[in-house]
Amino acid sequence: MKTSSVKAKGRVLQKWVVDLLIESLSLDPMDVESRPMSSVGEDIIIGSESRRKFPLSIECKNQEKINVWKSMQQASTNTPKNCEPCLIIKRNHSKPLVVVDAEYFVSLFR
């Protein structure tokens, strides 16, 4: 697969995540955006207002084969203070999945 196709596939997932956050959590569209491909840092840029509602740092991977642990390490490395790393993965013909730390996941239900 060409590099441009791989990046386009990643952009589609990032755009989908941005739209989902804006629509589902009523976030300000000016406060949430997809970072350009190959940029260093979080894949989804979330402003301070939206971060109060959604304290996760998102790394998106739209690939057929993925090393979850390596990708989660990348998410952790890019996570700012007071946020939790979150990996959103997708492959062709499958729904996106979210990977978060198990202890953080359980804390959501306290």
Image (cartoon, rainbow, N blue to C red):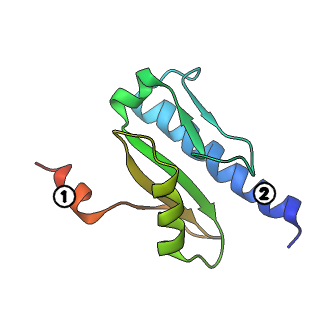
The residue that disc 2 covers is: 7
Residue positioned 31% across, 62% down in the render: 101
Q: Which mark is residue 23?
A: none
Res. 50 image quadrant? top left
> How many numbered discs, if any?
2
Disc 2 residue crowd, few under 14, some 14–19, many 20+, Cα 10 Å: some
Whether residue 37 is situated above or below residue 20 in the rendered picture:
below
Q: Amino acid at mark 1?
A: Val
Q: Of marks 2 and 1, which one's residue comes earlier in the chain? A: 2
Whether residue 53 is situated above or below residue 85 in the rendered picture:
above
Residue positioned 34% across, 30% down in the render: 53
Tell me, yes or no, if residue 58 can be seen here: yes
Query: Disc 2 versus disc 1: distance between alpha carbons?
Result: 33 Å
Say left or right for 36 vs 27: right
Residue 71: x and y in percent read 54, 67
Residue positioned 48% across, 65% down in the render: 73
In terms of secondary structure, where does tag 2 sit? helix
Residue 81: x and y in percent read 38, 40
Q: Between 63 and 102, which is closer to the camera in this rendering?
A: 102
Q: Amino acid at mark 2?
A: Lys
Say left or right for 70 vs 83: right
The residue that disc 1 covers is: 106
In terms of secondary structure, where does tag 1 sit? helix
- Asked if the residue under mark 1 is in contact with the one under mark 2, i.e. CB atoms within 8 Å, the reply is no
Disc 1 residue crowd, few under 14, some 14–19, many 20+, Cα 10 Å: few
Q: Residue furthest left?
A: 110
Tell me, yes or no, if residue 95 can be seen here: no
Whether residue 2 is situated above or below residue 27 in the rendered picture:
below
Residue 34: x and y in percent read 65, 39
Residue positioned 59% across, 20% down in the render: 30
Whether residue 43 is situated above or below residue 76 in the rendered picture:
above
Say left or right for 106 vs 41: left
